[in-house]
Every structure is written in structure tokens, then in C-alpha cells.
Image (cartoon, rainbow, N blue to C red):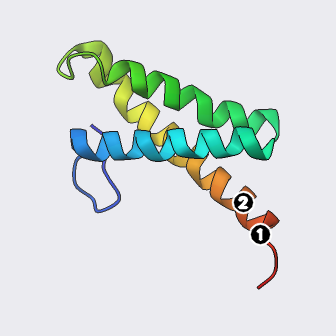
Amino acid sequence: MNDSVDGGPDTPMEIRHLLRTLKTALELALVARVPVDLLNSLARPAGLLGAVTELPVDTPAVEALIPVLLSDARAALERWDRWTKRRAPPA
């Protein structure tokens, strides 16, 4: 699997946490009426990660998809973070 932030392999718990974070960001993005491309970048990995976490992790299809989906999810969350920071009121 893909390497996590700390350099180790992603555990199922880390993947579930990332999925929860992604789903929360997606919900907030819907309410914030973000541009469609940002919304899609959050929705795609959220939906696919949700689906593959329901499958046995030791299947070739899941093993092949997980690293790509984790990378996409992290990139989408970084885009979401940048978008929200640009719109935050000045302190």
C-alpha cells in the first residue's frame, strides 16, 4: 500500500480516518458551493474509497486501487485546505 505521512504503510484505521476526513470535507464543500472541479476531486476518491473499504483488502483489484485513491484523496484534501484558507476572514 501507499506510504502514510509518517513513512509507514497505511493501516485500515488510517484509511478509515482519511475517508471520514474526506467525507466531512465533501459535505462542507457542498454547503460552501465550491467550484465543481474541487467538488469532483473530493467526491471521486470519497466514493471509491468507501466502496473499496467494503471489499477484502487482499484482492488484486483493491491492492491496485488503494495507493492511487489515497494519493487522490490527500491531493483533494490539500486543494480543499488551500481553498478554505484563501476564503478565511483576516484575523
Under mark 2, the amino acid is: Thr
Query: Do callouts 2 and 1 mark residues in contact (Cβ within 8 Å)?
Result: yes
Along the line of sight, which residue is nearer the eye, 48 or 88? 88
| Relative image position of residue 27 (x, y in whole percent) | 62, 39
Can residue 44 be seen here?
yes
Gap between marks 2 and 1, in whole Å?
6 Å
Can residue 10 be seen here?
no
| Relative image position of residue 66 (x, y in whole percent) | 35, 30
Q: How many marks?
A: 2
Which residue shows up at 21% across the image and 23% down it?
57
Q: Is residue 60 left or right of residue 76?
A: left
Quick one: quadrant of the C terminus?
A: bottom right
Quick one: quadrant of the N terminus?
A: top left
Q: Residue furthest front?
A: 31
Q: Residue furthest bottom?
A: 91
| Relative image position of residue 59 (x, y in whole percent) | 21, 14
Along the line of sight, which residue is nearer the eye, 12 or 30? 30
Q: Residue furthest left?
A: 58
Q: Say which element carries label 1.
A: loop
Q: Is residue 81 left or right of residue 64?
A: right
Q: Which residue is mark 2?
A: 84
**Residue 62 falls in image quadrant:** top left
Q: Say which element carries label 2.
A: helix
Q: Which mark is residue 52?
A: none
Which residue shows up at 43% across the image and 42% down it?
20
Under mark 1, the amino acid is: Ala
Q: Is residue 42 left or right of residue 64?
A: right
Q: Which residue is mark 1?
A: 88
| Label 1 Cα neighbours within 10 Å, binned few <14 / some 14-19 / many ≥20 | few
The answer to whether residue 24 is above or below residue 37 is below
